[in-house]
Amino acid sequence: MRRPLCVFCLAFLMILRLMVFLHPPALPDYQDLDAAEVTVCGQVISKEFSISESGRISLLITLSEPSLQGSNVSFDQKLNIMCRFRASQMQELEEISGRIPVSAHLTAQGRVRIYEPAANHGEFDSAFYNIGILQNAFEVDYAEAVSISSPDSELRASLGRVRSWLSGILQQELGDEDASVMRAILLGERKIVPKELAGIYRESGIIHILAISGLHISMIGAGLYELLRRIRFPIAPAAMAAVIVMMLYGTMVGTGVSTVRALIMFALHMAARIRRRTYDLLTALSVAGALLALQNPLYLNDSGFLFSFSAVAGAALLGPCFPAKLRFLSIPMAVLPVYLQYSYEFPLSSLLVNLAVLPLMSVLMAAGLMILFLGTVIPIFAPVPSFVVHLILRTFLLLCDLTSKLPYHSVITGRKAPWMIAAYLAVLLLTALYAGKIPEKIRLPLLAGAILIFTIPQYYGLQIHFMYVGQGDGILITMDEEEAILVDGGSSSESQIGRYTIMPLLKYYGVSRISAMILTHEDTDHLSGWEDVLDESSFQVERILLPDVAPSCRSENYRNIVKKAEESGIPLSFVGRGDRLQFDHGGKELDLYFLHPGHGASYQNANNGSTVFLLRYGDFTGMFTGDLESGRQEQEVLEAFRQLQRETGREEPVSLLKVAHHGSEGATSREFLEELRPELAVISCGKDNVYGHPHKALLKRLKEAGVRYRITSSEGEISLQTEQ
């Protein structure tokens, strides 16, 4: 058998992956500690500066083997606690960092902030990433040091000081933005990169340049080995010295997945040199994967782990399948399934950007290392490599900007079915294994054809997704892969709801074209995220629908919506009672009948002027009510509903009711429920909201009417699907 160790490790990984799928490890729950003031003790294992969306910098210190004073809460041996120190000036944080060496025992006070699981599909799962992958139990925010011991390991403390010193050199020579990138590339300080800049890199498919990986190890480790061999060091001492230096480097910059993978593979490479054996990249890769997964099986569900290993495997396996000029396509093809499963889109522009970025990375790293060397020895010459770094990083940004303006620079694909991923990987693997027996003129069409698997349409019928947006409303309605309707999208309790909830959910369901965006009224808790969707070039909004209320009822928010739509060139429709919106695809009809407001009518407030519509799809009906309150306006809706029933000859009960105004006491009267007779009601509201939604009186009315109900604050996103 060829590569027996590789086959064994792959079999182990497959079995472990199956076990994780069938019996996923449960993450510990620290909900009871949320917002509690605590005193935590532990040993400092890492320090890193972090910059927030608003530009505020904090110091993150991770403690191993933590304990809480005066508490019987116990922690798994693997779990750490992260302490976040805040200050108004960077200098204050640097002073705090200087007083707390790595490997010292720290006692700190602060407020617990737990990591929340994802409440919607597509949303970042903070609990899984921080607890499951980074293995941090929770964060102690606004931390203040109570006591600090001397370091247990002078070596680790010294490495921490060296890292801080080198960071200072980069900061001094390059300035804030470029220094942050080089600190990430050379010293593993990824959290200091401004979020906006990291977002540009991510959208262009070059975020990988900020990770310590094989390029660093090959340049530094392999470079050191070759240098020692040139000065007549024997193979074994040269290889061992290179491995030791790289292990120290890894300890200094942090042991992320890509770093550990590269270090394991480098160590195996050096071992092969010592034993004068042939180094097999695939065997080394599989061994590294098995060792990492053995330490933490949840890595097998982590996008970072899968990206790192897929890229190397793709270069090794698929590279020989392509002609030399097209070999750069091997890595994008290998990582495509990871993009589809975790990002739900693929940046086509990355194919062009990486053609320039990857060759320049070696030059960039060499220039960065030269800055560190000259900044230490001959600072007067450091501006020369600094100029090279500035030039290359400006080039990266220019490429990102130019390619982002290209049509289809990023394609939203949605999360694909497991059978599609399996079929695609099977084609790639078989092509790689039998590349020598398959003529080139067949190999290339075969690989291209594999991508077409992901274009097979998936039919789901009608789906309605009630997002959890905190205290607010956001609903996505889709019909197969043809139509998508976005109803509202805002929150009064969650910030940047468009970026972090609505757009990821749209991408998860493969929505790039929004047939209609219905904004039921102009309150912030219904529309705070709509502009983010409009401004994102990946989404095409075909029309915006607003309630056709009297001009005197149109607030500043309303007028801003109209202005923004006109500036964006998006058609506006003002809808009211008697209007109808119809979609027809292959004999399947989706109808929206608008029941409220009356055209040009005046209402006491925006809630009572909400757009109300009845959705019909086959035998399914759904009533969507915005923030409509009981009273005259509710009677108007019932009158319009009765008239519609008479006109269409359908008097069946409503299948679904979106409960008005987040379940407030003054909405959804008993008469309203008796008239509609809904089978299911959905209430959208925030956890522990200050309004007491949903109100007990409203829940009592639902129960008395025999209506089943579901609440987003309890369940997160609520998804419903009709028969196809």
Image (cartoon, rainbow, N blue to C red):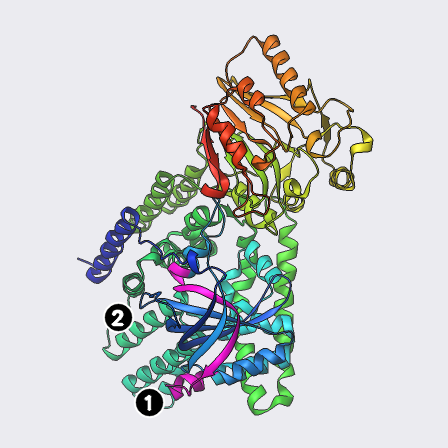
Q: Is residue 598 left or right of 99 when viewed as pictured? A: right
Q: CA distance from mark 2 to mark 1?
A: 21 Å
Determine if the magenta segment contains residue 224.
no
**Near-viewer residue (708 or 581):** 708
| Mark 1 secondary-structure assignment | loop
**Near-viewer residue (209 or 656):** 656
Residue at numbered disc 1: 233
**Near-viewer residue (187 or 324):** 187
Q: Position of residue 25 (x, y in %)?
A: 31, 54
Determine if the magenta segment contains residue 133.
yes
Which quarter of the figure is the C terminus placed in?
top left
Q: Quadrant of residue 251?
A: bottom left
Which quarter of the figure is the N terminus placed in?
bottom left
Tell me which amino acid carries mark 2: Thr
Part of the protein shown in magenta: 131-160
Taking the image as drawn, is residue 363 in sight? no
Residue at numbered disc 2: 278
Q: Is residue 514 above or below residue 318?
A: above
Q: Position of residue 350 (x, y in %)?
A: 54, 54
Tell me, for residue 361, which label it has, or none. none
**Near-viewer residue (490 or 50):** 490
Q: Give the mark nearest the N terminus, 2 or 1.
A: 1
